[in-house]
Image (tube, rainbow, N blue to C red):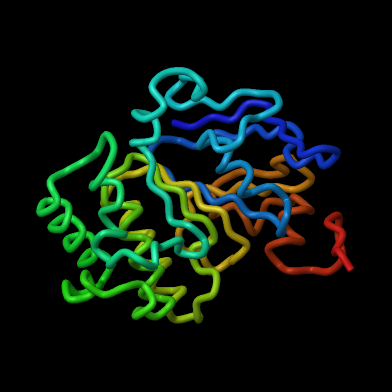
Amino acid sequence: MIELRDVHKSFGDLRVLQGVDLTVETGSSMVIIGGSGTGKSVILKCILGLLRPDAGSILLDGTDMRTGDRDAFLARFGMLFQGGALFDSLPVWQNVAFRLLRGTLKRPKSEAREIAIEKLRRVGLQPEVADKFPAELSGGMQKRVGLARAIAADPEIIFFDEPTTGLDPIMSGVINELIREIVTEMGVTAITITHDMTSVRAIADHVAMLHDGQIKWTGPVAEMDTSGDPYLDQFIHGRATGPIEAVR
């Protein structure tokens, strides 16, 4: 469904992506792993068109993403942001229904609220949460609101940016289970970026290891532990020694 071909992206003298090749199959859950600052978020921003690659191409269903109707293209996506990215001044239901209250996906306000409450229920939150403000919620509840917003418009593709950052192990497990259930039930194509190996094992169908601006290994999650790739092996076992140099 999504294909990156020899994608390059630099910021001045800093070469972040140096020939990324990656294929994400329709209906699969791809998790991109790698150390902090390796360019995982840059890949997502390039796919969404927030950044323009210096070279290479990004295809959606075989069509270059730089052509065609951008609004129609973006309507196919949902996203769970790393920090939640909720609007403090809006009640929860308006955060969830944000895309349904404006733009090409606009719905009547009453209908948008009903959809928001339904999506909140799907992520385990009661209807009374709808009229609260983000500041009144715990970190785990805010993350679930962000997840409800990501699925509110029934997207075909969902991006998850470090979905368990800042959460305790139990709440991380809850979020991982919700993501796995939603991806399976909705049949969406998912791309997650994370360095949390528990999340990788819980939600991935396929894994891609990014280092030095390139995909060093990609394959089914079941083959991750026996890949024989030195970069992947060092990363998933957290070893200080290996081809990946620790920044001191």
**Above or below for 38 versus 92:** above
Viewer-proximal residue among 143 and 25: 143
Residue 180 in picture, x, y percent from top left: 37, 59
Viewer-proximal residue among 201 and 227: 201
**Above or below for 147 versus 23:** below
Image quarter where the C terminus lies is: bottom right
**Above or below for 44 versus 223:** above
Q: In which quarter of the image is residue 37?
A: bottom right
Looking at the image, residue 19 sits to the left or right of residue 109; the answer is right
The residue positioned 75% from the left and 42% from the top of the image is: 16
Residue furthest front as drawn: 89
The residue positioned 54% from the left and 69% from the top of the image is: 165
Looking at the image, residue 185 sits to the left or right of residue 70; the answer is left
Count of all numbered marks drawn on residues in the image: 0
Q: In which quarter of the image is residue 57?
A: top right
Residue 111 in picture, x, y percent from top left: 11, 51
**Above or below for 68 versus 100:** above
Residue furthest left as drawn: 110
Image quarter where the N terminus lies is: top left
Looking at the image, residue 172 sits to the left or right of residue 240; the answer is left
The residue positioned 72% from the left and 43% from the top of the image is: 216
The residue positioned 58% from the left and 59% from the top of the image is: 194
Q: Quadrant of residue 125?
A: bottom left
Viewer-proximal residue among 86 and 73: 86
Residue 105 in picture, x, y percent from top left: 24, 38
Residue 158 in picture, x, y percent from top left: 40, 47
